[in-house]
Image: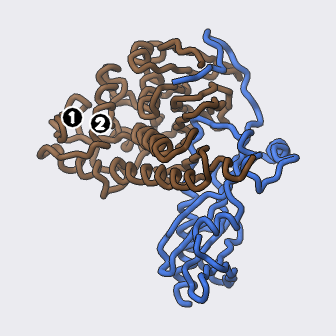
Chain colours: A blue, B brown
């Protein structure tokens, strides 16, 4: 164990640190698609009728954003589906990609990015300021600035609900052609 | 920086939380393999030790160990023997049988009817089997998550990563030459964040209380249950522990949250260190419990 405390040894009073937010970008959409389907030759975007989405929203909760869906091809054959969606948790926004095989089984789920904010509009500029001069598609540049936070348990409940909605899209539409 | 030296950094949903895995190493393909191996470790431990999954080994043991001794895997044996060891050293301030009470208060899914007065002393671990002397429900909670982090770190190392970090929703462990700054978030609706430690080798876990209390049957409840009284403790303390392994760090946060300075002996036994933060009129009172004096290398 090698460490160096940043907190003094004796009992001390500390002022709270305000405006702490963090964000991480792991993948661009294209990189996530390639990671999920290394053999793919094409990703064809598929549009879903608004009626289908509103029907799913009634049963399984509203979509935060319009989910994007691609049919994945290797040569002439279809090898699966890639879906991109975003959910809002209590304090975080999570962009995730879901890869399905041709039978609709989940092949992988990866988080492309998450941004934490306390949902407080006043703090948003402080959060955005983290990105000034940085390229959001370059995870290395961001990495040095991201804090490791102990105690920040992120809820995955909203992602689970999001995956449920995406699987309903598969069941209602994609499974039939 | 050359493409091949880029660190790999991914986040996946495993263990019921967002797990971030970061690794550095000689080539991208080595890191990709190390990442896959680390994820496989996390998934394997979740399958064995999750109390929420009815098909897990732990659920099977919970269902049957009161009637006859159950054979157990190495993973379950390691986590259980660590849990029982910490229970003994902390004189029951940590107790892996307290899960049923936490579930009864609505903070965990209920697996089985809350049994009567059983404690860690009723768990008989012998070699490769376990038996419960009374009906009880073992729930490792965060310490299984800590163990999964430890196994994922070993997988990164064994597969050629030269440095790495695994952070499972705040239970984190790092290895490598460079030290990483780690912050701590306190409990409460608007958790304050403080710089905590520069960590090069070791694990940090935090138990933050204060934000999760709720009314239940006209009484306040919190997920911190004192195993000795089997009653919830309305603590506003946030306890962070640094230890050589994430499994030990996570278990000791409960001991520190309940015993405060009284936890120093237990911390020393595991070569661990802790910080307690408690709110004081808009400020935070910070107490470091130096169990050991390990100088930064």
Q: Secondary structure at mark 1?
A: strand
Residue B281 quadrant: top right
**Depth check: B37 or B60 in front?**
B37
Q: Residues within 10 Å of mark 1 (few under 14, many from 20)?
A: many
**Depth check: B112 or B144 in front?**
B144
Seen at 38% across and 27% down, the residue is B226
Mark 1 touching mark 2, by CB under 8 A? yes
- Residue most extreme to the left: B68
Nearest to the eye among marks 1 and 2: give it. 2
**Depth check: A54 or A128 in front?**
A128
- Chain for disc number 1: B
Residue A177 quadrant: bottom right
Percent x, y of residue B123: 21, 34
Q: Residues within 10 Å of mark 2 (few under 14, many from 20)?
A: many
Residue assigned mark 2: B80
Residue assigned mark 1: B123
Q: Is residue A169 visible?
A: yes
Counting residues from the start of the chain, the first of labels 1 and 2 encountered is 2
Seen at 55% across and 25% down, the residue is B237
- Residue most extreme to the top: A10
């Amino acid at each position: 164990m090698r460490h160096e405390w940043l907190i003094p040894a004796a009992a001390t009073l500390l002022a709270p640190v305000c405006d702490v937010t963090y964000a991480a970008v792991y993948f661009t959409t294209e990189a996530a698609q390639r990671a999920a389907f290394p053999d793919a030759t094409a990703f064809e975007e598929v549009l879903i009728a608004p009626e289908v989405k509103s029907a799913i929203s009634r049963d399984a909760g509203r979509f935060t954003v319009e989910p994007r869906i691609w049919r994945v091809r290797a040569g002439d054959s279809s090898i699966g589906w890639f879906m991109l969606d975003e959910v809002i948790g209590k304090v975080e926004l999570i962009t995730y990609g879901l890869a399905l095989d041709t039978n609709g089984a989940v092949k992988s789920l990866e988080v492309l990015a998450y941004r934490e904010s306390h949902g407080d509009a006043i703090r948003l500029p402080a959060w955005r300021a983290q990105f000034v001069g940085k390229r959001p598609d370059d995870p290395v540049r961001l990495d040095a600035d991201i804090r490791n936070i102990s105690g920040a348990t992120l809820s995955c409940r909203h992602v689970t609900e999001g995956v449920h909605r995406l699987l309903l899209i598969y069941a209602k539409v994609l499974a039939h052609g | 920086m050359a493409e091949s030296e880029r660190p790999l950094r991914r986040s996946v949903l495993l263990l019921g939380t967002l797990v971030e895995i970061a690794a550095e190493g000689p080539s991208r393909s080595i890191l990709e393999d190390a990442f896959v191996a680390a994820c496989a470790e996390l998934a394997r431990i979740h399958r064995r030790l999750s109390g929420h999954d009815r098909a897990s080994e732990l659920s099977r043991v919970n269902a049957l160990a009161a009637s006859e001794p159950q054979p157990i895997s190495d993973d379950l044996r390691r986590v259980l023997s660590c849990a029982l060891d910490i229970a003994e050293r902390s004189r029951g301030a940590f107790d892996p049988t307290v899960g049923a009470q936490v579930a009864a208060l609505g903070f965990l899914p209920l697996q089985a009817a809350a049994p009567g007065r059983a404690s860690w002393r009723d768990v008989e671990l012998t070699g490769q089997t376990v038996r419960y002397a009374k009906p009880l429900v073992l729930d490792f909670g965060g310490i299984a998550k800590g163990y999964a982090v430890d196994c994922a770190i070993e997988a990164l190392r064994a597969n050629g990563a030269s440095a790495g970090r695994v952070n499972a929703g705040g239970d984190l462990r790092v290895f490598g030459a460079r030290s990483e700054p780690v912050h701590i978030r306190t409990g409460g609706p608007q958790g304050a964040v403080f710089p905590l430690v520069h960590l090069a080798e070791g694990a940090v876990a935090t138990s933050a209380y204060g934000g999760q209390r709720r009314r239940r049957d006209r009484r306040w409840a919190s997920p911190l249950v004192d195993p000795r009284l089997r009653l919830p403790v309305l603590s506003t303390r946030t306890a962070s522990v640094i230890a050589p392994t994430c499994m030990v760090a996570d278990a000791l946060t409960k001991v520190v949250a309940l015993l405060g300075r009284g936890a120093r002996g237990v911390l020393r036994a595991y070569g661990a260190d802790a910080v307690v933060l408690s709110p004081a009129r808009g400020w935070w009172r910070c107490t470091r419990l130096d169990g050991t004096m390990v100088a930064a290398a």
